Image (spheres, grey):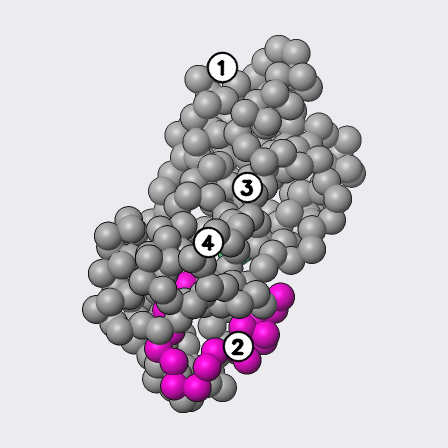
């Protein structure tokens, strides 16, 4: 395969990954974006898209070899730790240039009232008795909150859950993160007293943090897991510089 036909593989599932795919295609690179297939109707990045797990590090290595991938970019969510570990291992095993795009974490600003939790269990314990909580977490992270039968949860999800959530007192809010006005309206309409969320960083889901600040609501913020050292840049421009420096076609 001519070097210029070899694709860049972007491990995606984030807004930044989609923007990155568009930017690199505009510069003439062939891009394959990979999505895990967690949501039923995902926003598809421009260009070639593949969906579903690879089958661990070995499967990712096979895919890289089979597609003659020229460079690997991990642009997955900061809390998607397994695929990021797999990406580091597969890039090393296949000797591919590798870069990770990791948007900076949100920082507390004046007016924010955050309680920091390092784990889901710490977040569960930090919720005051009889609180009304917006739970803005992926569906696979809800189970530990089941032991808080004293708390009313509003669980925000994109797709309805396929299995019961196990929570005692809850309602579903089937929507994506909204604008400041929308987030403010939900917090008020549901008479919420707290938000539990993860420190995702970026702009797509920041409006709820602003809304909480303006309404004076406390946020229980789950901080990011420790990440292994990898070649990491904080923004799309940094990735593009890396690509240009490492691919000469
Ligand atoms: P994870 O726990 O790190 O990954 C679990 C497994 O899912 C991986 O071992 C891999 O399966 C598969 N996988 C994950 N991301 C993939 C991708 N982009 N392409 C192909 N396979 C992928 O991941 P997660 O936390 O479940 O997140 C899944 C996806 O949702 C990621 O793409 C992430 O960017 C996106 N996302 C996650 C969050 C979050 O809060 N975690 C939020 C927004 C978006 P195999 O081992 O079989 O390859």
> Which residue carries the number 1 mark?
28
Name which residue lies at 35% across and 77% down. Answer: 132
Q: Based on the displayed image, in which of its 4 quarters is residue 209 positioned?
A: bottom left
- Check residue 126 in the rendering and tell me which mark sits there, or answer none: 2
Q: Which residue is mark 4?
A: 110
* Residue appearing at x 55%, y 80% in the figure: 125
Q: Earlier in the sequence, mark 2 or mark 4?
A: 4
Question: Which residue is denoted by mark 3 in the rendering?
Answer: 103
Disc marking residue 62: none
Q: Can residue 102 be seen in this snapshot?
A: yes
- The numbered mark, 4 or 1, whose residue comes first in the sequence reads 1
Q: What kind of element bears circle 4?
A: loop
Of discs 3 and 4, which sits in the foreground? 4
Whether residue 175 sits left or right of residue 117 in the image: it is: left
**Crowding near the residue tagged with mark 4, few <14, some 14–19, many ≥20 C-alpha atoms within 10 Å:** few
Q: Is residue 103 magenta?
A: no
Give coordinates of residue 58: x percent, y percent.
71, 47
- Horizontal relation, residue 9 to residue 246: left or right: left
Where residue 112 appears, as percent x and y from the top left, is 45, 59
Mark closest to the chain's N terminus, 3 or 1? 1
């Amino acid at each position: 395969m001519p070097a210029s036909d070899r694709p860049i593989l972007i491990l995606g599932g984030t807004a930044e990954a989609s923007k990155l795919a568009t930017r690199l295609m505009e510069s003439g690179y062939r891009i394959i974006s990979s999505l895990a297939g967690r949501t039923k109707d995902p926003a598809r990045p421009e260009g070639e898209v593949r969906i579903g797990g690879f089958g661990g590090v070995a499967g990712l290595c096979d895919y890289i070899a089979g597609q003659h991938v020229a460079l690997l970019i991990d642009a997955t969510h900061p809390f998607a730790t397994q695929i990021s570990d797999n990406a580091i291992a597969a890039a090393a095993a296949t000797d591919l240039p590798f870069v990770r795009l990791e948007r900076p974490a949100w920082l507390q600003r004046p007016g924010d009232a955050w309680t920091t939790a390092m784990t889901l269990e710490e977040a569960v314990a930090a919720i005051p008795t009889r609180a009304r909580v917006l739970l803005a977490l992926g569906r696979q992270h809800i189970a530990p909150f089941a032991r808080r039968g004293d708390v009313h949860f509003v669980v925000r999800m994109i797709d309805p859950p396929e299995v019961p959530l196990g929570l005692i007192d809850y309602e579903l809010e089937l929507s994506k993160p909204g604008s400041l006005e929308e987030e403010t309206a939900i917090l008020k309409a549901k008479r919420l007293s707290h938000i539990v969320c993860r420190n995702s960083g970026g702009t797509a889901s920041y409006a709820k943090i602003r809304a909480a600040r303006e309404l004076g609501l406390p946020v229980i913020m789950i901080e990011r897991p420790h990440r292994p050292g990898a070649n990491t840049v904080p923004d799309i421009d940094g990735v593009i510089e890396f690509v240009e420096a490492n691919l000469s076609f």
